[in-house]
Image: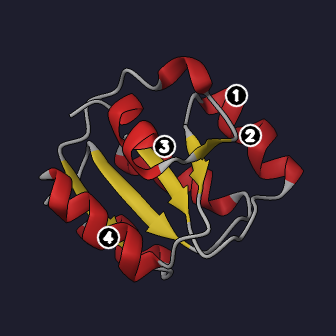
């Protein structure tokens, strides 16, 4: 499934790398512990977190994640958005809880 389809289905706000929404999403991972994301997520996953600091971009780039969904109405810092644009990492936001967003992704077939 393409990231653009997820953006549309979940009505996500695109904060960075809008030109990279053609990425294929092959799975998902939800965690706020960066060390867990680095150890357990897989290339092509969409990552759900409430964090908005620049380190999320470094982790997403290191793992090769398709993008990041910042949940619960949290907003990424301006420095984070700038770094994400430089790295080509889509950051998306939603008011949905992490649990709700994960459930909707599961319904879409992102598992």
Which residue: 39% across, 68% down? 101
Indicate whether 20 appears above or below 90: above
What numbered label is drawn on residue 30?
A: none
Which residue: 60% across, 25% down? 18
Helix, strand or loop at disc 3? helix
The residue that mark 4 highlights is 102
The residue that mark 2 highlights is 83
Q: CA distance from mark 1 to mark 2?
A: 5 Å
Instruction: Give the crowd class for mark 4: few <14, some 14-19, many >=20 residues within 10 Å.
Output: many
Q: CA distance from mark 3 to mark 2?
A: 11 Å
Question: With 24 as the anchor, is 94 left or right in this view?
Answer: right
Q: Is residue 39 visible?
A: no
Q: CA distance from mark 1 to mark 4?
A: 27 Å
The residue that mark 3 highlights is 61
User: How are the colours assigned in the image?
Assistant: secondary structure
Camera-nearest residue between 71 and 10:
10
Q: Are marks 3 and 4 in contact (CB under 8 Å)?
A: no
Instruction: Give the crowd class for mark 2: few <14, some 14-19, many >=20 residues within 10 Å.
Output: some
Q: Are marks 3 and 2 in contact (CB under 8 Å)?
A: no
Camera-nearest residue between 54 and 52:
52
Q: CA distance from mark 2 to mark 4?
A: 25 Å
First along the sequence among labels 3 and 4: 3
């Amino acid at each position: 499934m393409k990231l653009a389809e997820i953006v549309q289905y979940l009505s996500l706000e695109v904060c960075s790398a809008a030109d990279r929404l053609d990425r294929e999403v092959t799975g998902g991972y939800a965690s706020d512990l960066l060390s867990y994301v680095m150890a357990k997520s897989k290339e092509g996953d969409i990552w759900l977190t409430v964090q908005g600091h620049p380190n999320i971009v470094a982790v997403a780039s290191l793992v090769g994640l398709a993008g990041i969904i910042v949940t619960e109405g949290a907003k990424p810092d301006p420095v984070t958005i700038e770094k994400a644009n430089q790295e080509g990492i889509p950051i998306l936001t939603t008011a949905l809880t992490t649990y709700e967003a994960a459930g909707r992704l599961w319904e879409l077939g992102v598992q």
